[in-house]
Image (cartoon, rainbow, N blue to C red):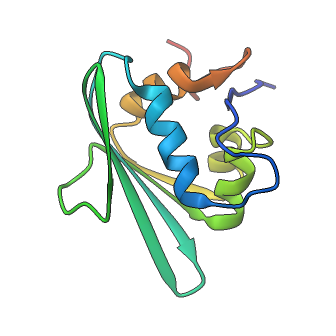
Amino acid sequence: MATYAKVRRLTKEREEDIEQTFQRLAELVRGSDTTGALRCTILEGEKSRSWTLELRGRDCRLQREATTMPDVEIITQRTTWWEIAEGRLSPLDAFIQGRMRILGNTELGSRLLGHVAEGDGATSLCKR
């Protein structure tokens, strides 16, 4: 059974601020030399909120509720995102368990996961 990469911790100790997890994610992907847009949609009961990371070479801008179509989108519950942000759950494990949906360019998602991964572990479900 494969071990999947977890992300570097995106949270601060004892502070549950979802906005700061996306700010930290944007910091980590800056300099990745990747171009594209990643939208993260977080479901909270009947509501949803989204953040979009627009990557242009070595720059990354974080936007709330962006209207442009993303290249890849992840959709998950707040509790699942928090486990990922704390480094307790791999995004790929969340996907396999049916706790996260991934739409669009999964190759871009795998590249970004590889850039923010903590330690060893696969960043793709398929071997290349």
Say whether residue 31 is left or right of residue 14.
left
Farthest-out residue, left: 68
**Residue 65: in sight, yes or no?**
yes
Residue nearest the viewer, comparing 17 with 35: 17
Give residue 41's position: percent from left, percent from top.
45, 62
Left or right position of 118 against 74: right
- Tell me residue 70's x, y (percent): 26, 49
Quarter occupied by residue 44: bottom right
Looking at the image, can residue 98 be seen?
no
Horizontal side of 19 relative to 2 (left or right) equals left
Residue 32 rendering spot, x and y as whole percentages: 38, 18
Q: Position of residue 50 (x, y in %)?
A: 41, 63
Residue at 60% from the left image edge and 84% from the top image edge: 45
Q: Residue at x 31, y 65 (%)?
A: 65
Vertically, is 39 above or below 59?
Answer: below
Q: Quadrant of the N terminus?
A: top right
